[in-house]
Image (cartoon, coloured by chain):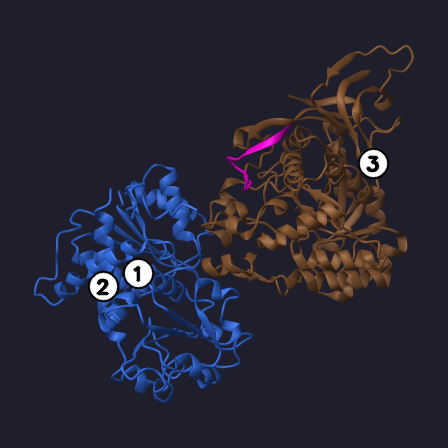
Amino acid sequence: MDIEIRNGRLIDPKHGVDRTASLFISAGKVVAIGDAPPRWQARRVIDASGLVVCPGLIDVSARLREPGFEYKATLESEMEAAVAGGVTSLACPPDTDPPLDEPGLVEMLKHRARSLNRAHVYPVGALTVGLKGDTITEMGELADAGCIAFSQADAPMSDTQVLWRAMQYAATFGYRVWLRPQDAHLSRGGVAHDGEVATRLGLAAVPPWAETIAIDTIVELARATGAQVHIARLSTHDGVVRVRDAKRSGLAVTCDVAANHVHLADTDIGWFNAQCHLVPPLRSGRDRDSLRAGLADGTIDVICSDHTPVDDDAKQLPFAESEPGATGLELLLPLTLKWAVEAKVGLPVALSRITADPARILGIDAGHLAIGAAADVCIFDPAAWWTVEPRSLRSQGKNTPFLGLEMAGKVRFTLVSGHVVHES
Amino acid sequence: MTNPQLNERGELTHLLTLEGLPEEVIRRILDTAVPFVSIAERDVKKVPLLRGKAVFNLFFESSTRTRTTFEIAAKRLSADVINLNIGVSSTSKGETLLDTIDNLVAMNADMFVVRHAQSGAPHLIAQHLSRTDRRHIHVINAGDGRHAHPTQGLLDLFTIRHYKKDFRGLTVAIVGDLLHSRVARSLIHGLTTLGTPEVRAIGPQTLLPAALESLGVRVFHDMASGVRGADVVVMLRLQSERMKGSLLPSAGEFFKHYGLTAEKLALAKPDAIVMHPGPMNRGVEIESAVADGEHSVILPQVTFGIAVRMAVMSILAGTS
């Protein structure tokens, strides 16, 4: 179908575009920008005046809960949530049940996702069998099945020998390795940042060095093996400093932060608010400020939703027993916009962190709107306010620290491969 | 941050923690407890303040002493007391914590006394009751995880006030495992709220939480300097599972550094009092000569504990 997106504020961070222009889409691709191609006849015209037109968002971490946790969420509900949030490509971590450690599971997931005709799904394969941290997976088979990277998700990797070998093996074939830096021993049993709040509330703590020691290990092994490493979910000031130093020293490492951690700190836990039980734990205000500064200066490449649908029963428990995680696909854009406004960062830079930058980390041709690019597009109203509440969320997960709060930024249209898959 | 223990008129509806409780609320509880001490000395040890009320002692973690003192307190107030020892953690074993609460509410409970191994469990229950519009049911925290044990904190305050009259001018030293201690957290909040100028925490780094100073205490690692000049020395219980492992090498070595002996107590003020929330480990936290000595007020603490719990229950019952 030929679609004309007329007179929007077109922002394409990758190509430095930020101007009012129309976008012309045909056969699933961008065919012209500004002036219509010869003999153009639109089958549909979307009036985007007053709206922002940008590449579809790319989320490097969204749990779809299939297979294994269908009572928390299904592919149907979460793919609906993705496009409602303007997300057109997403990477899903391997911590399903069973974990994504064999090609059949990955193929099934890709097939199920494709049949729903929503966002593009890029599975991240398990780095070790069963995420147990002792035997490396058949990465070649998994890559052929569609895995774009390999990860332990949040599962501990306490055996450094296995980590080293896994990174060597991945480096041999050029596979990406995504690692969340958390020392398994130092974080054992902990549920909150080792600071004032954990002291007051008597919660078992995760010290900041659980993260920094793991980063040191990962960076050192990345140097030793040449593996292409992405550090997932930074949470501490000292972690940001380490990644900045590693990048300055010339190491080709990348990293991300979860949208919740850009805005929240441990003080938001208040009196045991289980909505703020997240992994990694929310840290101090100073840590959060460093994460924001790291995002602005490019130390942190990407903001992700770290979407984790959790059912109510699993949240209605004492803090430490509650299941960590929050729904996020539909909040990725508003929370990124909120950061841009508060940090006085221009919209093109902010949008780059959820479009062009994650595309680079996934190694996919997406997240931009050059002529010939796939027409994955997000059209949003940056000035429209809406309230985060269970009925306003498509995700089956209704739990987020932002429940009840107002957000600016409403997705009006989402296009995937030239098809309108969401409008509101 | 709103205080979930107070209603819109600032009255106490639950007792979850001493943190953030206004000074006048704490003083009112202590004042209310005074006449209840003498009730225990009468022939008929009962008053009708809670007649017809159902108090559920809900113990998800076993405790004989605290449960018994709450039971005695409720019975002296003429309440009907139902004891439930659930004993296991709420998760994974079928019924959830809030399901249990809903069932007991359906049995017309008026007050829950909750002991739970997880920090924050009584808050969760109080929030659930408020969200489901059952605000007339009161929750008393009888100890949650490492977080709070407000009635213990109040009885400690009552004891200190009984012997020392006023908090202004006092130096209070709290010794031992503060990391895992709900008793210490509650006492610290109470003491600072009532204007105690010097609250000291004494222990090895492994048994002190990271940001302890943010609660308004001075941290000491050396027992002698910490106890020197103290008016009150509070010894904390060391759980047996902490005595050996990565936190401490042995009970003997703990006693060597932090056990209260007559010699160390001599560094405190001559009229210093010695407290312990019980049950004591003689020869681990405290030597017998001190526990049974003239400075010890450990048994009066138990007696006052009943009066303080009666005061809390009667104040809550008077709040609609």
**Residue extending farthest bottom:** B263
- Dot label at residue B306: 2
The chain coloured blue is B
Task: Find the distance from the CA under tag 2 to the CA under tag 3.
Answer: 70 Å
Task: Find the distance from the CA under tag 1 to the CA under tag 2.
Answer: 9 Å
* Residue at x 79%, y 11% (from the top left corner): A43
Q: Nearer the viewer, residue A285 or A186?
A: A285
Q: Colour of chain A?
A: brown
Determine whether label 1 and label 2 are within 8 Å by CB. no
The residue identified by callout 3 is A14
Query: Is A112 above or below relative to A197?
Result: above
Q: Nearer the viewer, residue A386 or A140?
A: A386
- Dot label at residue A117: none
The three-letter amino acid code for the residue at tag 1 is Thr
Query: Is A172 above or below relative to A43?
Result: below
Whether discs 2 and 3 lie on one chain: the answer is: no
The residue identified by callout 1 is B151
Mark 1 or mark 2, earlier in chain: 1
Magenta-tinted stretch = A399-410
